[in-house]
Amino acid sequence: MINWNGFLRNYRLWQRRWLYPLISLSVAISLCLSTSLPSQAIDIWQIIRKATEIAPQVTQVIQLSNLSIRDEVELGKQMNDELQQEVRLSRNQQLNRYVDQVGRRLAAHSDRANIPYTFQVVEDEAVNAFATVGGFVYVNTGLLKVADNEAELASVIGHEMGHIEGKHLVNQMQQRAIASGVATVTGLDRSQAIGIGVDLALNRPRSRQDEYDADRRGLITLTRTGYSQLAMVSFMKKLQGKSSVPTFLSTHPGASDRVLALQRQINSQPSKGNYGLDNTTYKANIRAFLP
C-alpha cells in the first residue's frame, strides 16, 4: 500500500529543494535575455552567471552545531509553516490567547527568556504536546481537556520549553543528518533540516537523558513562576493509570521513574508556590473555549 502522507511530504521537500529554485533561475535567465547587451554575440555562460546573481541561492546551508538565535528562530518559523501541512492549528482566538498567556508567564522565568516564544494549540484529541526550535511550542486540545487545572497545563508547557532550552531537537536533527549521510562539512541544506526537524518533532524517539533534562528544566521554570510544583507530578501520575499510554509519556524513562525523579527534585528545592490549582475556574474556561 502506498504511504500517501510520506509521498506528499517527500514531494513538498523536493519542491522546496529543486523545483522552486529552478523556476527562479529560469525567470532570472529570461530577465537577462530580455536585457540588451552591448554585443550582438550572446555569451550563454555570461547569461547564466548573471542569472545566478539575480536568482536566490539554490541551496541554503546551515550549521546546526553553531546556530545563532536569529537562525534558530527563523528555522522554527519555517518548520511551523511546514507543520501546518501535518497538523491542524486551532483558530480559536480565545483558546490560543489563554494558552499564550500561560506560556508567556513561564517564558519570563525561562533560562532562554531572550527568544520570542510562540505558543499554539493543535486541534487533536490525542493527549500530547511538542516543541520544535526557536521557541515554538504546541499543545493538543486533548491534553487541555485532560489537565485538571492551569498549573498542570503549565507543567506540560514548561516541560516542552525545557526541550527548547536544552536544544534537544537541534541535537537530534544533527544526529539524524549525520546518520543518514545528508550532512556535509559545510553544513546541512536548510530544506532538509526543516524536513528532518518536522519529522522528529511529530515522531521523535525521545531519549532518556532528554526527557529527564526537560522535566528538570520545566520544574525549575514552573517553580520560578509561582505555579505549584506538585502539579507536574499529579499530571504524570494521572496519565499513568490510563489503559493506553499517551504520546506525551510514550518514552523511556517510564512515567513512574520520571515521577520519582521529580519528587526528589522537589524535596531538594521545595517551594510554597501554589498558583494555578483552581480546578473549577480552569474547567469552566476550557469548557467555554472548547464547547
Image: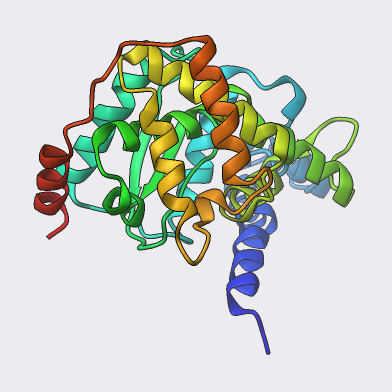
- Left or right of 12? Residue 139 is left
The quarter holding residue 210 reads top right
Horizontal and vertical percent position of residue 102: 27, 29
- Residue sitting nearer the eye, 26 or 289: 289
Left or right: 43 in relation to 271 = right
Above or below: residue 82 compared with residue 213: below
Q: Position of residue 19 (x, y in %)?
A: 65, 60
Residue 64 position in % (x across, y down): 73, 29
Give the number of marks: 0
Query: Left or right: 168 with respect to 80?
Result: right
Residue 63 at least partly seen: no
Judge whether 130 appears above or below 151 on screen: below
Toward the viewer: 93 or 226?
A: 226
Q: Residue at x 40, y 26 (%)?
A: 117
**Which residue is drawn at the image coordinates 88% and 47% (left, top)?**
179
Image location (x, y in percent) of residue 226: 30, 14
The quarter of the image holding the N terminus is: bottom right
- Name the residue nearer the viewer: 71 or 138: 138
